[in-house]
Amino acid sequence: MQPLRHLFLIPALFIALSASVLVGPAKAADRANLEAFLKTTGFDVALESIRLSADSAPQMLGLQADDFGSEWKRLVTEVFETDLMHGMAIDILGETLDDDELDHAADFYASDLGMRLVEAENRSHMIEEDGLKSESGGAILEGLKRIESPRVDILARMNDASGSIDSSVQAIQEVQIRFLMAAAGAGVVELQMDEPDLREAMQSQSDVMRESLQQSAMEGAAYTYQAFSDDEMIAYAEALEHPKMQKVYELMNAVQYEIMANRFEAVAARLQAMQPSQDL
């Protein structure tokens, strides 16, 4: 699956939870089905890959993960513990995802094409952020554009179907705000602006972030799906565009970002014992 219980839920997750309450009659998926669903769709690996984003936490404070030495690796291992994040996902999805939606998505990802897609996506998820994927994907993308390949539009269609860029921008900004506010509350940093001003400052950067995310998504897709044919990519896009799959992806993305925000807040609380306070 492509690439995300707090007072401040990410907006997309709040909407999804509210919708599930309003709809009501749909039967929530049971835990055994959810466990199988996470594995079949590859979402279990997507959750595990959240820890690869951990190094961006100190960067938001003007620091580097290396500044904390071996303590940082221990903190990441403990805070981004796989079973913990897995349990969080199961708890949220158990309240929001019904059996009909679960079965629809699982049936696709259990197909021959679906299984090969999950295998490719799982490999891609766990690649360290060292530039390999973006550089290789960027080179592939530039080559496709040079020969005016229809593949570029196919990849764009697929990315659009797997989640709104605007929603991703809002969710990432929420992760950043929640982390910075938690860091300030823990005494790790002293913010020079209050939360409304911080939100306004981030909002002013939305266009830049949106462009960056779109480019990154295209590079990632070009790299991840390079072994698949155009016809297979069209079939994937069509599957992702189905209303039931759209609902599943809305929930998957919201859950992934909520867990990321929750874990970043936990990082902020732990940083106080590792690093003296700094002005930001």
Image (tube, rainbow, N blue to C red):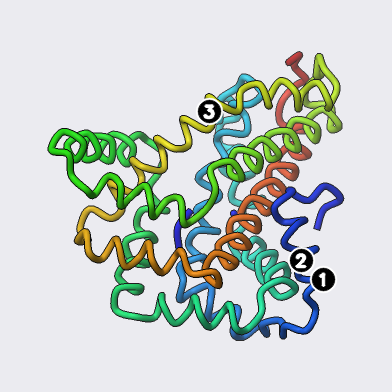
Image disc number at residue 22: 1
Mark in front: 1 vs 3: 1
Q: Label 1 near label 2: C-beta < 8 Å? A: yes
The amino acid on which the numbered mark 1 sits, given as a three-letter code, is Leu
* Sequence-earlier tag: 1 or 3: 1
Q: Is residue 63 left or right of residue 151?
A: right
In the image: residue 258, left or right of residue 149: right
Mark 2–mark 1 distance (CA, rounded to whole Å)? 5 Å
Q: Which residue does the numbered mark 2 point to in the structure image? A: 19
The residue drawn where x is 80% and y is 19% is 191
Q: Which residue has dot 3 on it?
A: 66
| Quadrant of the drawing holding the C terminus | top right
Classify 10 Å Cα crowding around label 3: few (below 14), some (14-19), many (20 and above).
few
Residue drawn at (57%, 68%), measured in percent from left and top? 248
Q: In the picture shown, does residue 130 fall above or below 12? A: above
Badge 2 amino acid? Ala
